[in-house]
Image: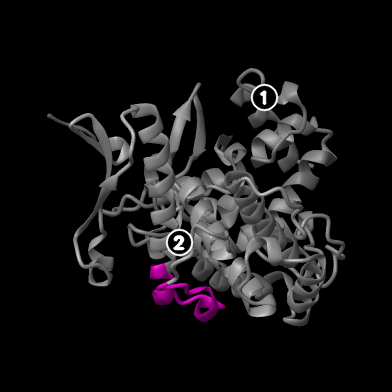
């Protein structure tokens, strides 16, 4: 009698459970057979399932390590553990990265994996390849100084430390290692080298909007849309024409995740009423005879949104109109100030901008009606 449980990598033969896993095609050259199979030495399905899932996880970690040699990341020559036979005897940073990506990387955009590999690659470049238990507080402070010496500012160092800390914390928990994470609570100046982003002055906003009306092209539609919604550049650049919708009799932009452009946080998904230059921009976009489904086809190829290209072009143009010190993101800062100036409640400001509102109560209900948001946005236009 032969029984199988494919979802747990097991099959049963003569009452005994066996482990079975196909070797991935890209790694087949490293094995003498195309399938790994052996007895789990138990008649208990529960015990077999636990052992099989544990062994499958070990294989996932080992196969990830074998593939690392093909990745173009910092420290790849040190992270590559191809051929290592003791993968189950001591958890390394490579094991931690593989585990983190397997458990946390599901349905995440490519930038998620790249960020994890880049941050941990920097750590290997600085402190070398070690078992997790071998990293010390001295390594953590050395890593901090290494990142600053590379010219990174405090905000960038904080992001990288956050990534490394999260990867190691998950590994310590999953591998059952009773050690402290040396990368936790490391002091550094988060403001070091960070340039404060200036909000665009109200008179300059009007000046830019007038220039957008005159130029009346795709780039200026994007600027005009952002100027009176406070959207992030990537949010606007990745929009579809179908994201402009009418709800409750109000024309809105539906900011939602797409395969080619994710959102920064879950609170970023929102409806923003269109007023002022944003409403004009959407009208001009929808009037264009085009076969493209994208609102800004120049920055979308169907697979990814090229927000970096948009940023470079728009920031260059913006500097010629209102001078140095401002970027497209400055309009987002301006929107918060504009709503503050008309004494708009902070919860409504957060709802319009997609900022996270603190407190348990903020997650209750569906938020303010669109008409309320529209009234405050309209009020801010006249301030």
The crowd level at tag 1 (other Cα within 10 Å; few <14, some 14-19, many 20+) is few
Q: Residue at x 68, y 64 (%)?
A: 160
Which residues fall within the magenta stretch?
66-83
Mark 1 secondary-structure assignment: helix
Residue 362 horizontal side relative to residue 247, left or right: right
Tell me residue 210's x, y (percent).
Answer: 62, 59
Residue 148 horizontal side relative to residue 363, left or right: right
Front position in the image: 120 or 92: 92
Q: Residue at x 60, y 39 (%)?
A: 275
Above or below, 248 relative to 208: above
Q: Is residue 217 visible to us here?
A: no
Q: Which residue corresponds to mark 1?
A: 363
Whether the magenta-drawn stretch holds residue 301 is answered as: no
Tell me residue 298's x, y (percent).
Answer: 39, 65
**Res. 218 mark:** 2
Q: Residue at x 56, y 61 (%)?
A: 116
**Res. 119 mark:** none
Q: Residue at x 56, y 50 (%)?
A: 225
Tell which tag, 1 or 2, sits nearer the viewer.
Answer: 1
- Render colour scheme: one colour
Quadrant housing the C terminus: top right
Name the N-terminal-most of marks 1 and 2: 2
Q: Is residue 163 visible to us here?
A: yes
Quadrant housing the N terminus: top left
Tell me residue 235's x, y (percent).
Answer: 53, 50
Specify the quadrant of the image occupied by residue 381.
top right
- In the rendered picture of this protein, how many numbered marks are placed on residues? 2
Front position in the image: 275 or 332: 332
Specify the quadrant of the image occupied by residue 299.
bottom left
Tell me residue 198's x, y (percent).
Answer: 79, 62
């Amino acid at each position: 009698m032969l029984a199988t449980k494919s979802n747990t990598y097991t099959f049963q033969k003569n009452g005994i459970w066996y482990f079975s896993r196909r070797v991935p095609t890209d790694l087949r050259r490293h094995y003498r057979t195309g399938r790994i199979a052996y007895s789990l030495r138990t008649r208990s399905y529960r015990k077999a399932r636990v052992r099989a899932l544990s062994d499958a996880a070990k294989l996932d970690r080992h196969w990830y390590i074998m593939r690392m040699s093909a990745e173009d990341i910092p420290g790849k020559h040190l992270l590559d553990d191809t051929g290592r036979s003791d993968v189950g005897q001591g958890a390394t940073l490579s094991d931690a990265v593989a585990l983190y990506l397997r458990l946390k990387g599901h349905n995440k955009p490519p930038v998620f994996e790249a960020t994890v590999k880049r941050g941990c690659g920097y750590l290997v470049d600085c402190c070398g390849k070690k078992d997790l238990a071998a990293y010390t507080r001295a390594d953590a402070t050395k890593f901090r100084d290494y990142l600053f010496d590379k010219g990174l500012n405090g905000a960038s160092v904080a992001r990288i430390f956050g990534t490394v800390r999260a990867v190691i914390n998950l590994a310590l928990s999953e591998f059952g290692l009773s050690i402290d994470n040396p990368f936790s609570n490391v002091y550094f100046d988060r403001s070091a080298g960070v340039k404060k982003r200036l909000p665009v002055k109200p008179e300059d906003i009007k000046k830019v909007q007038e220039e957008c009306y005159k130029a009346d092209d795709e780039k200026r539609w994007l600027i005009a849309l952002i100027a009176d919604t406070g959207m992030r550049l990537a949010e606007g650049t990745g929009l579809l024409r179908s994201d402009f919708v009418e709800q409750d009799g109000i024309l809105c932009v539906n900011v939602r995740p797409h395969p080619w452009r994710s959102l920064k946080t879950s609170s970023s998904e929102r409806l923003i009423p269109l007023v002022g230059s944003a409403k004009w921009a959407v009208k001009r976009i929808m009037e264009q005879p085009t076969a493209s489904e994208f609102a800004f086809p120049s920055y979308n190829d169907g697979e990814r949104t090229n927000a970096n290209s948009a940023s470079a072009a728009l920031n260059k143009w913006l500097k010629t109109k209102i001078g140095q010190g401002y970027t497209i993101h400055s309009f987002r800062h301006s929107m918060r100030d504009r709503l503050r100036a008309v004494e708009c409640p902070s919860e409504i400001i957060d709802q319009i901008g997609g900022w996270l509102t603190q407190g348990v109560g903020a997650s209750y209900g569906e938020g303010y009606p669109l008409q309320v948001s529209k009234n405050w946005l309209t009020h801010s236009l006249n301030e």
